[in-house]
Amino acid sequence: MTDVLGDPAPDGLLEAFWDYETALMGDDLAALDRLFAEGPDTLRGDAAGLLVGHEQISRFRGGRGGAPARSVLEVHVRSFSHAHALVIAITELERGGRGQQTQVWRRGADGWRVMAAHVAVPAPAFDSRVWRVVGDPLVRPTGSGPLDGETVAVKDLFAVAGQPVGAGNPAWLEQAPVEPTPAWAVRMLTGGGAAVRGITRTDEFAYSLAGTNAHHGTPPNPRAPGRISGGSSSGSASAVSLGHASIGLGTDTGGSIRVPAAYQGLYGLRTTHGAVPTAGVMPLAPSFDTVGWLTRDAGLLARVGDVLLPDVAPRPVREVVVVPELLALAEPDVAAAVEAFADRESAPRESWSLAELESWREAFRVHQAAQAWASHGAWLRTRLDVLGPDVHGRFEAAAAVSPDEASVAAARVTAARQTIRELVGDRVIVLPSASSVAPLLGADPGQVRDATLRLTCLAGLGGLPALSIPTATAEGLPCGVSLVAAPGRDRDLLAFAVAHAERLRP
């Protein structure tokens, strides 16, 4: 029996509360919508973040697939007036552990409605959407240096000694051997003083930009609750954004550092192709694959560069250019945020013809697909059914690329690389890191993926470094400013990001 404690409940309040509880346990979305106050001021918060407005709350409930089964043990009521009351419920989850639900109710002409709610549930031992395996730490530092005291979330493509590489797919993980030695980047980071916190989830074989792994779920995006995390370095990005680790180690083939950085308000660097050895990293498309990393601040991003990048003194960035035609490829809210950044940097406008962009993107897609099948086709040929639907479709298309199509695409990539490098020259080009803010959970990411690839493929085709700097739209949603430079100017971009962050300090 549930105890009701505190003030006498105003008429109808407890009935409304129990109606809400029944609707919650039955996932009755219509009743839940009715019992939450209409309008933009209604609030619902939990550990993942705050949802503002009835529309956001309704969308969240529609996409989560129901709340965990629970019992209500105690209900505490505090009445402010005949029309306003605070209700705190102590709950016990069926899976174990106690939780707490705090609600502010208001009575109107249509009865009692929730104006604000906060839900607390027992924290999991570790979030399996983010981590495959975690330790305290998993790997201790092997040396001392610029990264003393830092922790690394390692994408599940990098070899970690004593662990298999899982590549985001349970069937692959089941047969994967234990790695005897770490990947080059992991070895350098631990040698520089960092500890490996754990191994993080990735989209299957890193062949996605969404972060929505069909087997393990979508890592949370605490900077934009109810929206996707961005992939394929999704787990590493979420681990950093959540504060579980200070450095997210990942890869970027078509945008897999820049996109999650933009979606989650992080700094992220895709390095010049070949600047950081990929030894010990599972390939997707070797002619595009690069090592990258994410952090919450520019200074740490640069210190990681001190450990992983060639020891070349940075040169000042003397010219920052924005291309209106590239801005126009993004949604208006993101384009406006990137343009505001360019204005603050007094970046001149420079017009580019993008007549070849669509053929470049298609060449990137086909060349990437051909390499992806070359990397994994032998194992996947009879196992495509072990993949989630989106990655399954991508590998199925990759299997159908003919040798002639692959050869034509490779030639177009070579030509595009030369043209893009000539366009960039010795300047830094400003463009959006992704075409939009993070899509909502449950939305079809296909159209957004194509739009984003039109932007991200430029650095991939050119083999160029690209650094994503966090900014936000006018509505406060995170997005990213991508800075693209000539090959080898990775440290120049890092120094620029540090200087830019210093200029923003109060």
Image (tube, helix red, strand yellow):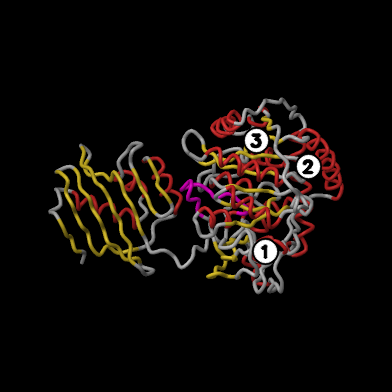
Residue 91 in percent (x, y) is at 30, 63
Q: Nearer the viewer, residue 385 or 200?
A: 200
Element at label 3: strand
Dots 2, 1 in contact, CB < 8 A:
no
Q: Whole-Å distance between the Cαs marked 2 and 3?
A: 21 Å
Report which residue position mark 2 lands on: 363
Element at label 2: helix
Element at label 1: helix
| Residue 470 left/right relative to 97 | right
Q: Is residue 252 magenta?
A: no
User: Is 309 drawn above or below residue 148 in the view shown?
Assistant: above
Task: Confirm whether residue 386 shows in the render.
Answer: no
Going from N to C along the chain, the mark reached first, 2 or 1, is 1
Dots 3, 1 in contact, CB < 8 A:
no
Report which residue position mark 1 lands on: 186
Q: Main secondary structure of the magenta part?
A: loop
Residue 138 in percent (x, y) is at 58, 70
| Residue 398 left/right relative to 112 | right
Q: Whole-Å distance between the Cαs marked 2 and 1?
A: 32 Å
Q: Quadrant of residue 65?
A: bottom left
Report which residue position mark 3 lands on: 431
Task: Confirm whether residue 294 shows in the render.
Answer: yes
Q: Residue at x 22, y 44 (%)?
A: 112
The magenta span reads 220-233
User: Is 219 drawn above or below residue 362 in the view shown?
Assistant: below
Q: Nearer the viewer, residue 344 or 363?
A: 344
Q: Residue at x 53, y 70 (%)?
A: 136
Going from N to C along the chain, the mark reached first, 2 or 3, is 2
Label 3: how many Cα within 10 Å (few below 14, some 14–19, many 20+): many
Q: Is residue 231 magenta?
A: yes
Quarter of the picture containing the N terminus is bottom left
